Image (cartoon, helix red, strand yellow):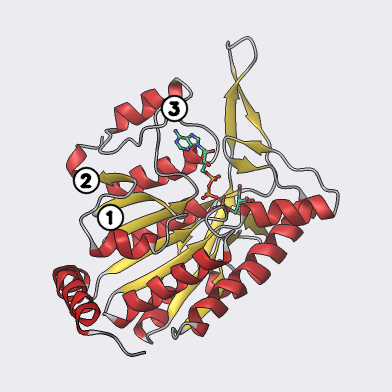
Amino acid sequence: MSLDRSSALNIAQVLTEALPYIQRFTNKTIVVKFGGNAMIDEALQNSFARDVVLMKLVGMNPIVVHGGGPQIGQLLEKLNITSEFVDGMRVTDSATMDVVEMVLGASVNKHIVNLINHNGGQAIGITGKDGQLIRAKKMSVTRKTPDMKATEIIDIGHVGEVQSINTSVIEMLVNSDFIPVIAPIGVGNDGSAYNINADLVAGKIAEVVKAEKLMLLTNVSGLQNKSGSVLTGLSTQQVDALIEDGTIYGGMLPKIQCALDAVKGGVNSAHIVDGRVNHAVLLEIFTDAGVGTLITNNQNLT
Ligand SMILES: Nc1ncnc2c1ncn2[C@@H]1O[C@H](COP(=O)(O)OP(=O)(O)O)[C@@H](O)[C@H]1O
Ligand SMILES: CC(=O)N[C@@H](CCC(=O)OP(=O)(O)O)C(=O)O
């Protein structure tokens, strides 16, 4: 590719502008959650993969955690298995769990690994079962009875919450210069598989590896208020109020919760970013242009 002088100068300028960011994040771990909804467009998948490869090449340590909710939904539909969600969690019976393992652990995971490798990176795909990376236990969900007088427990099947993360598996990969690509399947004490919301896995991993940043890529421009404006810099109390009045619901519930937990657990900042934007990851890391919702530990999170 031959460039004229002015285009070449532009590129040189962009690279020098990125220099302070590269210096700041060298050797830092950045956990990127690639949501199933942001994953639908092929061009966006490629731009995501290139961003991750570039991060690694300039000395950062990206760790990818992926979702795949819409992809699980498509296969369930083909198999005529109905699916429902409670508070953003898919009710998971045994047949659904088999589909979750097939989609997340096999097709989606290997697709992302292949994209990163094809773009010049070295990715290795694993689930939480590999090396017992994600130890999980059954998630218990409660809700108020219709008369609002008592609380009842709802059984949502093989849905898990993270109990512990075996960081040595991640360290081994990162220290050998591989990019870990992690599917959110956990393993219980008895060896059974658990379906875990990918945001919750990304948040927990960011916390235990002491990541500098947690980036959650999704299919909206960030956390929005009822009129659609993006909200940023919120306190825990403000978030609680938004959940209470129904502004935050469904898939945004685990996202915002894990962002708050990660930051309280020591991650410097958590970002809910619009994954429909080309090179969303690079824009967030290499520029000051605030994309999406930012949650930091300067917000007095209690
Ligand atoms: N306050 C809110 N702001 C933005 N999105 C919200 C909000 N409350 C609920 N949502 C829903 O959360 C969805 C994102 O969660 P989800 O579909 O699980 O995404 P992903 O697959 O990226 O994890 C949005 O598409 C939107 O429908
Ligand atoms: C318990 C639970 O809901 N698990 C999710 C796991 C995938 C996921 O989280 O995918 P996204 O990030 O694309 O939403 C599910 O079954 O859809």
Three-letter code, disc 3:
Ile
In percent of width and height, residue 231 lies at 32, 35
Three-letter code, disc 2:
Asn
Q: Residue at x 60, y 73 (%)?
A: 111
Q: Is residue 209 visible?
A: no
SS for dot 1: loop
Relative placement, left or right, of 152 versus 275 is: right
In percent of width and height, residue 194 lies at 63, 56
Q: Is residue 150 visible?
A: yes
Along the viewing direction, whichever of 149 and 294 lies nearer the viewer:
294
**Residue 89 lies in what quarter of the image?**
top right
| Residue at the spot of label 3 | 243
Q: Residue at x 60, y 61 (%)?
A: 185
Q: Residues within 10 Å of mark 1 (few under 14, many from 20)?
A: many
In this rendering, the label closer to the viewer, 1 or 3:
3
Q: CA distance from mark 2 to mark 1?
A: 8 Å
Q: Which quadrant of the figure contains the C terminus?
A: top left
Three-letter code, disc 1:
Val
In percent of width and height, residue 175 lies at 35, 83
Along the viewing direction, whichever of 184 and 43 lies nearer the viewer:
43
Would the CB of label 1 be found within 8 Å of ligand 1? no
Marks 2 and 1 close (CB-CB < 8 Å):
yes
| Residue at the spot of label 2 | 297
Q: Residue at x 46, y 74 (%)?
A: 180
Mark carried by residue 6: none
* Mark closest to the chain's N terminus, 2 or 1: 1
Marks 3 and 2 close (CB-CB < 8 Å):
no
Mark carried by residue 267: 1
Relative placement, left or right, of 181 versus 213 is: right
